[in-house]
Amino acid sequence: MFYGEYYHSIDRKGRIILPSRFRDVCKENGIEKFFITRGLDKCIFMFTEEEWRLQEQKFKTMPFTKQESRNFNRLFFSGAIDVVPDKQGRFIIPQFLKDYSNIKKETVIIGISNRVEIWDSKTWKDFYATSSAGFEQIAENILNV
């Protein structure tokens, strides 16, 4: 559903814009609302409302008697807010999520099929530089091809 890598800046009013291809996908699929929260590797996860509900169901089954489950759920859900982009696809990322992900001005928005990730530009470039060299090995390890 969401694919690609797009560079955008936070505007002077603190808004970020959803890439036009993503807005097209939203229009085609009747998507109006998203949920954003703390992601992994210092990015922000962005889910459609439908995908958010699916993830929420998965996380509800995690045993609350386990410390790791409690910690993950606390951090994941306490950082969540719903956003509805305006007609131009703009929305505000709360300061606590910008702080978590080190986002100041320049961002990279990437599509990961069923979710969107929002990265600080430098953090993304650093991640890409360290991870891309091992892409083939990662594929071999996880795809069993």
Image (cartoon, rainbow, N blue to C red):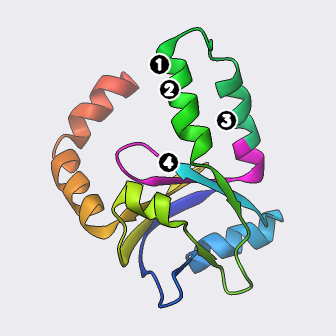
Mark 3 element type: helix
Is residue 104 shown in magenta? no
Label ID, residue 71? 2
The residue at which mark 4 appears reads as 38
Residue 126 seen by the camera: yes
Label ID, residue 68? 1
Left or right, 48 with respect to 135, comes to: right
In this rendering, the answer to whether 132 lies above or below 145 is below
In this rendering, the answer to whether 5 lies above or below 64 is below
Question: For the residues carrying marks 1 and 3, which lies nearer the camera in this image?
Answer: 1
Q: CA distance from mark 1 to mark 3?
A: 17 Å
Question: Which residue is situated farthest in the bottom direction here?
Answer: 12
Q: Amino acid at mark 1?
A: Glu
Q: Amino acid at mark 3?
A: Gln
Mark 2 element type: helix
The residue stretch that appears in magenta: 39-52
Mark 4 element type: strand
Q: How busy is the neighbourhood of tag 2: few (under 14 within 10 Å), some, or many (20 plus)?
A: few
Q: How many marks?
A: 4
Is residue 49 shown in magenta? yes
Residue 145 seen by the camera: no
Q: CA distance from mark 2 to mark 3?
A: 16 Å
Q: Amino acid at mark 4?
A: Arg
Comes first in the chain, label 4 or label 2: 4
Question: For the residues carrying marks 4 and 2, which lies nearer the camera in this image?
Answer: 2
The N terminus is located in which quarter? Answer: bottom right
Comes first in the chain, label 3 or label 4: 4
Q: Are marks 2 and 1 in contact (CB under 8 Å)?
A: yes
Mark 1 element type: helix
